[in-house]
Image (spheres, rainbow, N blue to C red):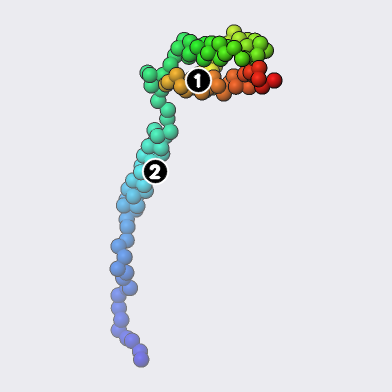
Amino acid sequence: MEISNVSGAYTSSKIVETDDEKETKKTEEEEAKEQKVTEKEEKDSVEISSDDFDEESVEDKASNYVANIIANPKLTEESKALIQQYMATFDAARFIKMYGPFTSTAEISAAMYAVTSHMIKYQQDE
């Protein structure tokens, strides 16, 4: 069977996008990606609250922590000396930078425990 007298071009049901529409679409996609990146960066940032302890407060809380340890009568003399030496060279700014910022005394105590736990020896442990 032969088909004759067919004229015209084959047309698709697809809508052909113009160059302007393609540019607009690309721009919108890029803006959406940038917005997602910006939102992610905002989530990753850390805000320091005004409730955080300052250097003076941290040093005071650390001194109280050490005083409570030294008050234990079963603490060895060597341990007392090590802990007192540590407190003599205690740098609150460096301590906050390494372990902080601190919003509670419990956080300071936990950090102090991490730093001093290897220095503490009791008489019954020897």
Please identify the quadrant where the N terminus is shown: bottom left
Residue beneath the point at 40% across and 34% down? 43
Q: Is residue 77 above or below residue 43?
A: above
Residue beneath the point at 32% across and 48% down? 24
Q: Position of residue 61 (x, y in %)?
A: 48, 13
In what element is the residue under mark 2? Answer: helix
> Which one is in front, 53 or 33?
53
Answer few, some or many: residues within 10 Å of disc 1's Cα (few below 14, many 20 plus, some between 14 and 19).
some
> Which one is in front, 90 or 26?
90
Q: In this view, does 54 lie above or below 34?
A: above
The CA span between labels 1 and 2 is 43 Å
Q: Which kind of residue does numbered mark 1 sit on?
A: Ser
> Which one is in front, 97 or 108?
108
Q: Where is residue 103 in the image (x, y as percent from the top left)?
A: 42, 21
Q: In this view, does 83 lie to the left or right of 20?
A: right
The residue carrying mark 2 is 33
Residue 91, by quadrant, is top right
Residue 8, by quadrant, is bottom left
**Between discs 1 and 2, the one toward the N terminus:** 2
Q: Which kind of residue does numbered mark 2 sit on?
A: Lys
Q: Which residue lies furthest to the top in this view?
A: 88
Residue beneath the point at 33% across and 73% down? 10
In what element is the residue under mark 1? Answer: helix
Please identify the quadrant where the C terminus is shown: top right
Answer few, some or many: residues within 10 Å of disc 2's Cα (few below 14, many 20 plus, some between 14 and 19).
few
